[in-house]
Amino acid sequence: MVMKSGYVAILGRPNVGKSSLLNALMGQKISITSRKPQTTRQKITGILTEDECQVLFVDTPGMHLEKKDALNRFMNRDAKSALVDVDIVVLVLDRGKYKKEDQVVADCLKHVTAHKIVVINKVDLLDGPNELFPILKESQDLFPEATMIPLSAKKEKNLEALKKEIKNLLPDSPFFYAEDQITDRSERFLISEIIREKIMRQLGKEIPYQTAVVLDGMSTQSNHVKIDASILVAKNSQKKIIIGKDGERIKRVSIDARLDIEALLQQKVMLRTWIRVKKGWSNSGEILKSLGFDEG
């Protein structure tokens, strides 16, 4: 049987459910999620191998209009770079109103020759077909060359239709990765992302955007894995907020992160976290490069 393999970029504005869609398609957690924008900061590839096909899903950061610091420039560049040499682009739209950020993403696709699929996500929140049809028509008018697929990543509704369309469009090609590999990212990267996810879920609107996570050390002991991690913040006041009253918030972050890391590694974990103030870290090219951001 002929093998098929190719890259599929998942693109969209912040918070339309790109990472949730990747995880649902993969059948396991690859990319962290939260209800806050800027959850995904760097490209991560999920590798799905089934039915003689290997699909390389590239989850991208949401494209940002407002913030102009170095971090957001890196993120926008990362999202745009995902369009280079991909075979298929999956543009994710919310079932709600078409926004200015959607148009920015759409403009990036004007000169992209890859096959295009438009996913209308979160349709489980609509009342029924009467609400869906106008959204599909508007989307088809905006992207006449694209295939329209309404679905719910959260409810795993209509995912098979998307998978089938992607597999049909994949080029004939040998696999790029081993059949049992599920991502191109290292365990250290995934662990730091898990910790950052728990911070984002614990805190309010502003603080998560001013945090980053660095693994200071990771070693295998006789019966567990020992992990030391630093949480970077921009201000002393943010450090106090993350610690919380009597240290309760950072304790909750660490416990929730440890449980997910144990599930990832399939081993017991001892996780120690420190909060360090690095003023202006999100606008420092040097610090961002140390966190894995490529200037491109």
Image (tube, rainbow, N blue to C red):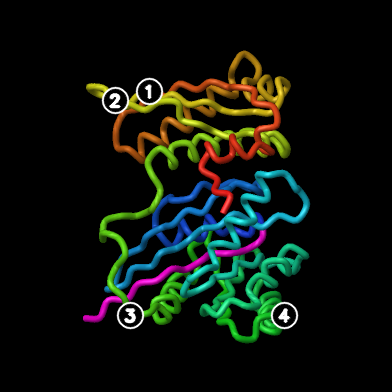
Dot placed on the residue nearer the N-terminal end, 1 or 4: 4
Q: Left or right: where does residue 279 sit relative to residue 43?
A: right
For image coordinates 62% across by 20% down, the residue present is 243
Disc 3 from disc 4: Cα separation: 33 Å
Q: Which residues are magenta?
A: 1-13
The span from disc 1 to disc 3 (Cα, nearest Å) is 45 Å
> Number of labelled discs?
4
Relative to residue 160, is residue 180 depicted above or below?
Answer: above
- Check the image and report above or below for 32 versus 176: above
Residue 43: which disc? none
Dot 4 amino acid type: Glu
CB under 8 Å between callouts 2 and 1?
yes
Spatial CA span between label 1 and label 4? 51 Å
Q: Front-most of 224 and 35?
A: 224
State the residue position of label 3: 172
Q: Secondary structure at mark 1?
A: strand
Which numbered dot is residue 270?
A: 1
Residue 38: x percent and y percent?
64, 47
| Label 4: which secondary element | helix
Q: Which residue is mark 4?
A: 138
Q: Residue 272's spot in the image, x, y percent?
A: 45, 21
Identify the residue position indicated by label 2 in the image. Answer: 224
Q: Which residue appears at 59% of the width and 69% of the height?
A: 91
| Residue 11 lies within the magenta run | yes
